[in-house]
Image (cartoon, rainbow, N blue to C red):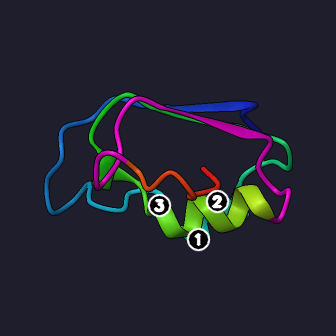
Amino acid sequence: MADVVSLHVKLTEDTRHLLGAREFGLMKEGALVLNGARGDVLDINALRDALLSGHLGGAGLDVFPEEPLPSDDPI
C-alpha cells in the first residue's frame, strides 16, 4: 500500500471526487494525500472526516473546492 497519494489530473466529470470516503477508507492508515490538481478532484468533506478520525495522517492541499476555506475549517 502507498504511503502517499498525489493527485495531478484535470477536473472532468470522470475525475470529480476521484477520492472520496470509500477511497480514503481503503487507504493505508496514516497515509498522506496531496492535491495539486483541482479542488473538486477530492471530496473535501470525506477528506475532513478521514483526517479528523485519524485514519489519514495528513494532507497537503494547494487548492480547495471553495477558496478561501473558512478560517474555522479544521483542514
Above or below residue 34? Residue 74 is below
Q: Are marks 1 and 3 in contact (CB under 8 Å)?
A: no
Residue on which disc 2 sits: 24
* Residue that appears at 27% across and 35% down: 9
Secondary structure, mark 2, is helix
Label 3 – label 2 distance at C-alpha = 11 Å
- The image position of residue 74, as x and y in percent, is 64, 55
* Residue that appears at 67% across and 30% down: 4
Q: Nearer the viewer, mark 3 or mark 2?
A: 3
Q: Nearer the viewer, mark 1 or mark 3?
A: 3
* Residue that appears at 18% across and 47% down: 11
Q: Amino acid at mark 1?
A: Ala
Q: Quadrant of residue 33?
A: top right
Q: Quadrant of residue 58?
A: top right
Q: Amino acid at mark 2?
A: Phe
How many dots with numbers?
Answer: 3
Residue on which disc 1 sits: 21
N-term mark: 3 or 2: 2
Q: Is residue 74 left or right of residue 34?
A: right
Q: Are marks 3 and 2 in contact (CB under 8 Å)?
A: no
Q: Nearer the viewer, residue 20 or 47?
A: 47
Q: Residues within 10 Å of mark 2 (few under 14, many from 20)?
A: many
Chain part drawn in magenta: 53-68
Residue on which disc 3 sits: 44
- The image position of residue 10, as x and y in percent, is 18, 38
Q: Is residue 12 left or right of residue 28?
A: left
N-term mark: 1 or 3: 1
Secondary structure, mark 1, is helix
Using the image, tell me which numbered label, if any, was put on residue 7.
Answer: none
- The image position of residue 15, as x and y in percent, is 26, 54
* Residue that appears at 30% across and 54% down: 65
